[in-house]
Image (cartoon, rainbow, N blue to C red):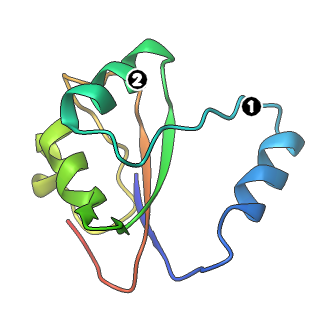
Amino acid sequence: MVIHLKIYGCYFAPLCSSHNIYVSQVQIDPAYQPPQLLHSVNKVDVKALISAEFFKTNSCYQILRAVIPELDGYPESGVEIKSSKTPSLKTLIIMSDKHYR
């Protein structure tokens, strides 16, 4: 599932909600390049990933596209992700004013 958010105080909401539904929260370094991100996502079986659109000069979405090439084929939102490279990842949330595919 790809969801687009226009929230700027974004880290408080996932933190609170993760405690209410008993999920683990793992921080992934936003400076990771595709091979490092792929390794981290698969190592801890990430089910959902919340990401900013950019981190400094890096386009986080472009890095995610390299890790999950199937993103281009999905509609803008509401679809569960099915990727051969990241089988555990089902939900992707991009915090942006833009709509991505």
Distance from disc 1 to disc 2, alpha carbons, whole Å, reads: 17 Å
Q: Quadrant of residue 81?
A: top left
Q: Nearer the viewer, mark 1 or mark 2?
A: 2
Which of these two is toward me, 96 or 22?
96
Instruction: Categorize mark 2 by other alpha carbons within 10 Å: few (<14), some (14-19), many (20+).
Output: some
Position in image of residue 52 (x %, y %): 44, 65
67 and 78: which is toward the camera? 67
Q: Which residue is mark 1?
A: 23
What is the number of the mark on residue 56? none
Residue depicted at 17% across the width and 57% down the height: 62
| Nearer-N-terminus badge (1/2) | 1
Position of residue 24 in the picture relative to residue 16 (left or right) = left
Report which residue position mark 2 lands on. Answer: 40
**Please, what is the three-letter code of the amino acid marked with disc 1?**
Val
Q: Amino acid at mark 2?
A: Ser
96 up-or-down from 93: above or below = below
Q: Secondary structure at mark 2?
A: helix
Q: Position of residue 80 (x, y in %)?
A: 37, 44
**Element type at mark 1:** loop
Q: Residues within 10 Å of mark 1 (few under 14, many from 20)?
A: few
Name above or below for residue 95 compared with residue 64.
Answer: below
* Residue at x 30%, y 83% (from the top left corner): 98
